[in-house]
Amino acid sequence: MGWLWAIIVGFVLGVIAKAVIPGKQHSPLWLTTICGILGAIAGNAIARALNVHETRGIDWSRHIFQLVAAIIIVAVVDSLYMATLGKRKRQQV
């Protein structure tokens, strides 16, 4: 069940990150979900390093760290995806 929650949270974080980033992102949904999962892992690690990973109530700080990490990862991976896709299209012509 842990993997299912990781995929769901990764999907939600990835879609929110895509919505926040200005412009159009061309990466597919599966790649966005993987970036969201990585953002959740990175956000949890940052929250743990800053000792704010366990608070009473909703862990807003942890969720903010996860979202910011997902935004950064989605932006970087999308630019790398487009650079790779652009090279591939130029080689086909």
Image: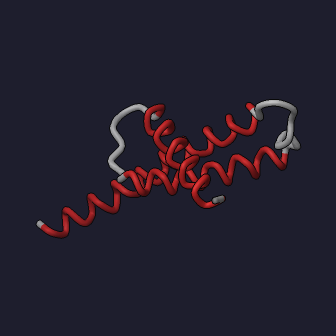
Of residue 54 and residue 82, the one placed in the foreground of this image is 54
Residue at horizontal 64 percent and vertical 49 percent from the top: 40
Task: Give residue 49's position: percent from left, percent from top.
Answer: 84, 49
Residue at horizontal 52 percent and vertical 42 percent from the top: 12
The image quarter containing residue 89 is bottom left
Q: How many marks?
A: 0
The single residue placed furthest to the front in the displayed view is 1
The single residue placed furthest to the left in the displayed view is 93
The image quarter containing residue 13 is top right
18 sits to left or right of 1: left
28 sits to left or right of 46: left
Task: Give residue 9's position: percent from left, percent from top.
Answer: 58, 47
Task: Give residue 20's position: percent from left, percent from top.
Answer: 48, 31
58 sits to left or right of 87: right
Q: Is residue 90 above or below residue 15?
A: below
Q: Is residue 44 above or below residue 15?
A: below
Residue at horizontal 88 percent and vertical 43 percent from the top: 51
Task: Give residue 56's position: percent from left, percent from top.
Answer: 87, 32
Of residue 33 and residue 8, the one placed in the foreground of this image is 8
The quarter in which the C terminus is drawn is bottom left
Residue at horizontal 69 percent and vertical 37 percent from the top: 63
The image quarter containing residue 55 is top right
68 sits to left or right of 12: right
